[in-house]
Image (spheres, rainbow, N blue to C red):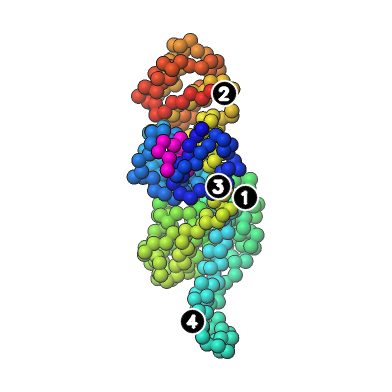
Amino acid sequence: MYVIKTLNAISPVYETVLNMEDYAFDAQAQSPDAIMVRSANMHEMEIPESVMCVARAGAGVNNIPLDKLAERGVVVFNSPGANANAVKELAITGMLLASRKVVDGVEWCKTLSGKGAEVEKLVEKGKGQFTGPELQGKTLGVIGLGAIGVLVANAGVALGMDVLGYDPYISVEHAWKLSRAVRHSDSMDEVLKTCDYLTVHVPLMEATKGMINAQALAKMKPSAAVLNLARGGLVDTQAVKDALKSGLLRAYVTDFPSDELIGAPGVLCIPHLGASTPESEDNCVRMVSRQVDEYLRWGSIVNSVNYPDCPLGRCTEPRISMLHKNVPNVIGTVTQLIAGEGLNIDNMINKSRGAYACTVVELEKAPSEALMDKLAALETTYRVRLILP
């Protein structure tokens, strides 16, 4: 039986995916085979040697030490796209809130409490201060056309907006899902200069950190609004505040509040609600449950964020799964050790991702314990497993 340690409250929908005769979920497990996490910070956590994989029920993995785990032979999974519809709906909400001054209007209405029969007249007199533009006919710029960006772009088309998308790395899968009405730009500058609403849907990494900065904002229309429902670090907070203060930007909607942004004029802070729907949480758990199940049973790696994807079917022969350094001569050493035992390799897969690699070898018969020990003892090996049919 495999034991899964949970670090947060996890939707029990995993029971519809997994054969629960083979799994036990235990938040207090001392030697789990896998960990399932949502938002808990794992950077300072002592992770047992028994752990073979970590599954993040969500897309972002900033709370997980990816390289540290990779060097221990622990595969980290996430669930890209599982919360895409929830974030899309919040993006639509954000555009409406940035346009119609609904939040300000609601707060103002609260001040009319106790005015009795005067309320109707006061509403008619005061509503003009909350006038705002419609979305129809405006230009929506979408940076990042992954699972979420594609849905947001298509929703913009459905709302009657002129949609301009930018993603030099768009996948074939996502390109097929994109409405033909979405114009694909080869230049981020074109998107910045053209859009009335800009929404960013890219991962946070060194290359994207602070990508919406003073230089980017200076290229935008003074009437534009920026939405950031992806990661706080994508946007230069001080640059946004300065642009709002000087009139270079109309509104900023973010799902990542900070002390500097809360209460700032023109800023709408949402308390990280992008994936906070029961449907989204269920989708994420379903996805990572499948990934964990296929990895623990067959060594298949799908949607890993620290190792290369290596999708495998059910094994019909003894299968050696190795996680190792991506350096020269690893494959030669492994095949030499296997040949030294007189075993024939029926099938072999090698995939790499940056500093880390995965090698899967299927043999005509099971290797000896001595061979497995030799493979595990290699200086390049992080983890080696024998998976039997």
Q: Secondary structure at mark 4?
A: loop
Question: Which amino acid does the dot numbered 1 rest on?
Answer: Leu
Q: Badge 1 is on which residue?
A: 178
| C-alpha gap between disc 2 and disc 1 | 41 Å
Mark 3 or mark 4, which is nearer to you? 3
Mark 1 or mark 3, which is nearer to you? 3
Q: In the rendered structure, which disc, 3 or 2, sits on the residue that comes first in sequence?
A: 3
| C-alpha gap between disc 1 and disc 4 | 45 Å
Within 10 angstroms of label 1, few (less than 14), some, or many (20 or more) residues? many
Magenta-colored span: 28-36
Residue 362 sits above or below residue 237 on the image: above
Q: Secondary structure at mark 1?
A: loop
Percent position of residue 51, x then y:
43, 35
Q: CB under 8 Å between callouts 3 and 2?
A: no
Q: Is residue 32 magenta?
A: yes
Residue 83 in sight in this render: no
| C-alpha gap between disc 4 and disc 2 | 70 Å
Outermost residue toward the bottom?
117
Q: Is residue 337 left or right of residue 191?
A: left
Q: Badge 3 is on which residue?
A: 12
Q: Nearer the viewer, residue 259 or 74?
A: 74
Name the quadrant containing residue 67: top left
Q: Badge 2 is on which residue?
A: 389
Mark 4 or mark 2, which is nearer to you? 2
| C-alpha gap between disc 3 and disc 2 | 29 Å
Q: In the rendered structure, which disc, 2 or 1, sits on the residue that comes first in sequence?
A: 1
Q: Nearer the viewer, residue 221 or 290?
A: 290
Within 10 angstroms of label 3, few (less than 14), some, or many (20 or more) residues? few
Q: Secondary structure at mark 2?
A: loop
Q: Badge 4 is on which residue?
A: 111
Question: Which amino acid does the dot numbered 3 rest on?
Answer: Pro
Q: In the rendered structure, which disc, 1 or 4, sits on the residue that comes first in sequence?
A: 4
